[in-house]
Structure formats: structure tokens, C-alpha cells
Amino acid sequence: MDKFVINGGHPLKGEVTVSGAKNAVVAILPATILAKDVCRIENIPNISDVTAMINILNIMGAKIKYINKNTIEIDTRFINSYVVEHELSKQLRASYYLIGALLGRFNRAEVAMPGGCYLGVRPIDQHIKGFEALGATVTMEENAMVNARADKLLGNSIYLDVVSVGATINCMLAAVRARGLTIIENAAKEPHIVDLANFLNTMGADVRGAGTDVIKIHGVENLHGCEYSIIPDQIEAGTYMVAAAATKGNVLVKNVIPKHLESITAKLVECGINVEEYDDAVRVSATGRAGKCNIKTMPHPGFPTDMQPQFAVLLSIAKGTSIISESVWDNRFRYAEQLSRMGAQIHVNGKTAVIEGVEGLKGAPIKADDLRAGAAMMIAGLVATGVTEIEDIHHIERGYENVVDKFRSLGADIQRKEFPDDDQKIQMGAG
């Protein structure tokens, strides 16, 4: 069993370069299925979610060529299956994007319900609503397979009852080769929605309005291969920004799009943290304790739910009492128990957390409950006095490339260490 072992109390200083956006690449990789051609994709983050998606495409018949660790060529001409079994799809939540992509190419898709982080019930009713509006029949099989089929896909109006990133992406994937005009209303506006639209248009699609709440797609008969570079990861950038603030450090976060970070920057500034913006970088510096602030997570351009756990760590050592209201996921505060072990005063009631700032945190054995909670635990370990050991680090490696090396380059005392698990300990004791 591998753990991250952090000896805290060191301010982060230096420069860190942000990788490609996890939430964009896990949509763009399935989108290559629609091209029936060769796509060259650059700035791909080297994370386990990407490895899992590439593995699925490879098993389905795609030919993958690594140009370097962050650039691949993917040839989807020879994909001959529209079925994704449970063992493959359970590795990541984004496997449900394969439904839209396969439906768009084959008018058929059989994909097992996805895995990934458990943050409460993640229904795909809005995805199904979109597929059905385009003319597909969708059934849920007893073995948790989603079975979608259509004689042909026809453009239509789709109104999403809730703002859903996943449903917006899946409807886009299914609609780009449907006959006629598709209008997606109440669409999500996140940067990775825009990145997917730009990728599809580079392949020859006609997608307009991405980044607004109405997306219009004129279906085309065929798409073609292309070269494309993934946008920087907004959440990875935000994580290093908050880590710099929490450790009272001074960090230049490079390869970012500052506009994507506006909601995060605004809250840091509200807490008294200094943030300087450049063309493709931001510098975050702090000399004293942060001040309190209140946060409500919202769909983009509001404060992102994926930054909520990390910011909670900063607020746990801020001056005064802060309130976080979670409006996106039901189960996002599971990390509160871990923070409390380190001395944080955090009280959760449903989808609200009240955080009373304390002078400091103390190192403790903790675990990563999910991807972003895991990133928060790393920040907590960096600010705590003493040693922090973090278990279940596979969650963190789903979304952060070279996270140990990047933090170490900023002066953090952090190592990845292998520990015997409980079964091994028993066997060793018996021997």
C-alpha cells in the first residue's frame, strides 16, 4: 500500500507548471471515435484517468501511438465495437462519454455504468433525456449496462432540467453527426465544454455557443482527424494557488488561463491573499494568516465544487469563522472527518459546513476520500506541524500529474512510500 508522507511547515516557493485539463481530456479522447481517422492530441496529462480511457479505446480497436509522454496519436478507424464492459468502465466516471461518442458513430452503444469518485448519487437521467430527444431508445439492463440504439439520429431541441457538465458533453458528442440542428438549452459553461467544442470543430463539426447556456450544433455527415492541444487544468492551477496561500508561500503558477481562475482568485483576494495575474501565469503570495470568507459552489462561472475541499483547508487556519455552502454534490464534505483529526474545527450540517479558523493543524494519519478531498489532504499535510501520512492516494493520481515532484520542486518535504497493508502485516507477524 503506497502513501504520501509529508513533513509539514515549509512555505512553498518557486514555479510550478500546470498540466492539461483532466476534465477536458476525458471528453476529448472519446470524441476521437467520431472522426474515424487519426488525431494528434498534445498537452495530455499523465494521470490514471487518461490511462484508463486510452486502455478502453485500445481494447475497442483504436491504435495508440505515444509521441512523447504528453502527446499521442490515436487512430480510431478500426474501432469495431460499441460495447464497453463493466470491468473497464468502472475505472473512471468519464466512461459514460463513450455512450454519446459510440451512439454518434454507430447509432449503438452498450456501456456499463461508470465508476470514479463517490460524491453521492450521480444519475444520468439528463444524458438519457438528450439521447432520446435525438431519436435513440435507451434502456438500463439488469447488469448495469446502458443500452442505447437508434435507426438514425436526428437533431432536436434538448432542455436540460439541471446544469450538468456530463449531460452537456454527452449530448454534444451524440449530436455532432446527427441530421439537422440540435439546440441544447441550459447547457453547462465550464472551460472544458468550450475545449471539447473547439476540438469537435477542428475535426469538422459545426458547434456554436459553447461557453454560453445555449449550444447550437448543425450535424455534419463526416468528421476528420486533426491536431489539438488540451487547455491547462483550472482545478490543478487552483490547487497550487491555495497551497501557496495556505503555507504562506510565494508561487508562480505557469501555463494557466487566468480568466478560468477568476472565481478562485476573487476568493483568495477576499481572504487577503496577494494574487498577481500575467498573460499565462498567476503569482500567489502570502505572509500572514488568511482572513475568513464565505463560499457557495456554483456551476461555471461560479466557484467550482472541485475547489471546495482545498479551500476548506485554507479557511480552517484562517482568522474568524467561514461558511461553505455546497450546491452541486451531496457527499462533498466527507473530508471533514479527516481535517478534524488534524485539529480543524469544521462542523457539517447537510450541504453546509461552518469552519472556525484555528492557529494551525497537526500531522496525523489520514486518507483521501476522493480526488479533490485527497488534494485538500495534501495541502493540510503541507501546513501541519509534524508528519502526515495519506492513504488511498490512487484517488489523487486520477487527476494530478507528477504531484509529488511538483510539490517537491516548490520546497515541500513529501515522499511516496510503500507500506505493508494489514494482511501483509499479519503474514509477516505469523512468519
Image (spheres, grey):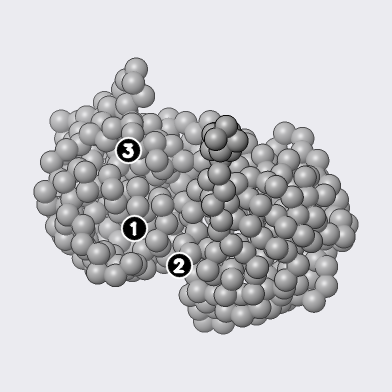
Q: In the image, residue 402 lies at what x, y percent? A: 48, 64
CA separation in Å, label 1 and label 3 = 26 Å
| Residue 285 left/right relative to 401 | right
Going 32% across and 28% down the picture, which residue do you hit?
Answer: 146
Q: Quadrant of residue 42?
A: bottom left
Q: Amino acid at mark 2?
A: Ser
Distance (Cα) linking label 2 and label 1: 20 Å
Left or right side of 235 for 127: left
In percent of width and height, residue 207 lies at: 30, 56
Dot in front, 2 or 3: 3
Q: Which residue is at a point 38% across and 31% down the rendered structure image?
A: 113
Answer with left or right where residue 297 lies relative to residue 33.
right
* Mark toward the start of the polypeptide (2 vs 1): 2
Label 1: element kind = helix
At a point 34% along the width and 21% down the height, the residue shown is 143
Amino acid on which the number 1 mark rests in the picture: Ala
Secondary-structure class at tag 3: helix
Residue lying farthest to the front in this orientation: 431
Label 1 neighbourhood size at 10 Å, few (<14), some (14-19), many (20+)?
many
Question: Which residue matches tag 1?
Answer: 197
Task: Find residue 76 and report its horizontal and vertical position in percent.
Answer: 17, 52
Front disc: 1 or 3: 3
Q: Give the numbered dot on residue 88.
A: 3
Residue 19 is tagged as 2
Q: Quadrant of the C terminus?
A: top right
N-terminal of the two: label 2 or label 3?
A: 2
